[in-house]
Amino acid sequence: MEGLEETVNYIKSDLLPDYDFDEYTRRNKEWEERRDENDDSEGEKIITSEKKPSDQSSDDDDMTW
C-alpha cells in the first residue's frame, strides 16, 4: 500500500504539479448544491422529454415491424 501512495504522490508532485486534482470534487459539490436548490425552489419536476412538432414523423414515415 505504501508503494501505491508513493506512486500517486510522485505523479501529483513531479509529473503533474500544475493540475488541480480537487477540481472534480469542487465541481461535483457545486453541482449537487445547485441541484438541491433547484429541487427546493421548483416543487415539481418539469418533463423536458416532450417531442417537438418538428421531431414527430408523419404517418407515411412510420415504420411498423
Image: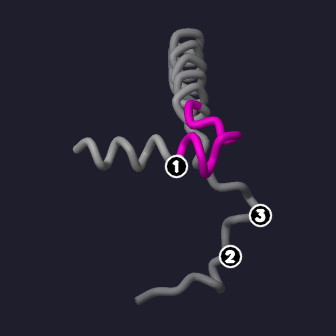
Q: Any mark on residue 54, and which?
A: 3
Q: Nearer the viewer, residue 2 or 64?
A: 2
The picture places residue 44, in percent across and down from the top left corner, at 51, 20
Residue located 65% across and 41% down the image: 17
Q: Quick check: 20 above or below 1?
A: above
Judging by the rendered image, the residue that carries numbered circle 2 is: 58
Residue wearing tag 1: 11
Residue 53 lies, with reference to residue 9, above or below; the image says below
Residue drawn 60% across and 19% down?
34
Indicate the amino acid at tag 3. Answer: Ser
- The secondary structure type at the circle numbered 2 is loop
Quadrant into which the C terminus falls: bottom left
Q: How packed is label 1: few (under 14 Cα within 10 Å), some, or many (20 or more)?
A: few
At a point 64% along the width and 84% down the height, the residue shown is 61
Q: Nearer the viewer, residue 39 or 52?
A: 39
Q: Nearer the viewer, mark 2 or mark 1?
A: 1
- Given residues 24 and 33, the one toward you in this image is 24
Q: Is 15 covered by the magenta stretch?
A: yes
Name the residue furthest bottom.
65
Would you identify the image quadrant in which residue 57 lies?
bottom right
Is disc 2 surrounded by few (<14), some (14 to 19) or many (20+) residues within 10 Å? Answer: few
Neighbour tally class for label 3: few under 14, some 14-19, many 20 plus, Cα within 10 Å: few
Q: Amino acid at mark 2?
A: Ser
Horizontal side of 44 relative to 18 (left or right) equals: left
Task: Say what secondary structure mark 3 lies in.
Answer: helix
Q: Which residues are magenta?
A: 12-22
Cβ atoms at labels 1 and 3 below 8 Å apart: no
In the image, farthest residue toward the right? 54
The residues tagged by marks 2 and 1 sit, at their Cα atoms, a distance apart of: 57 Å
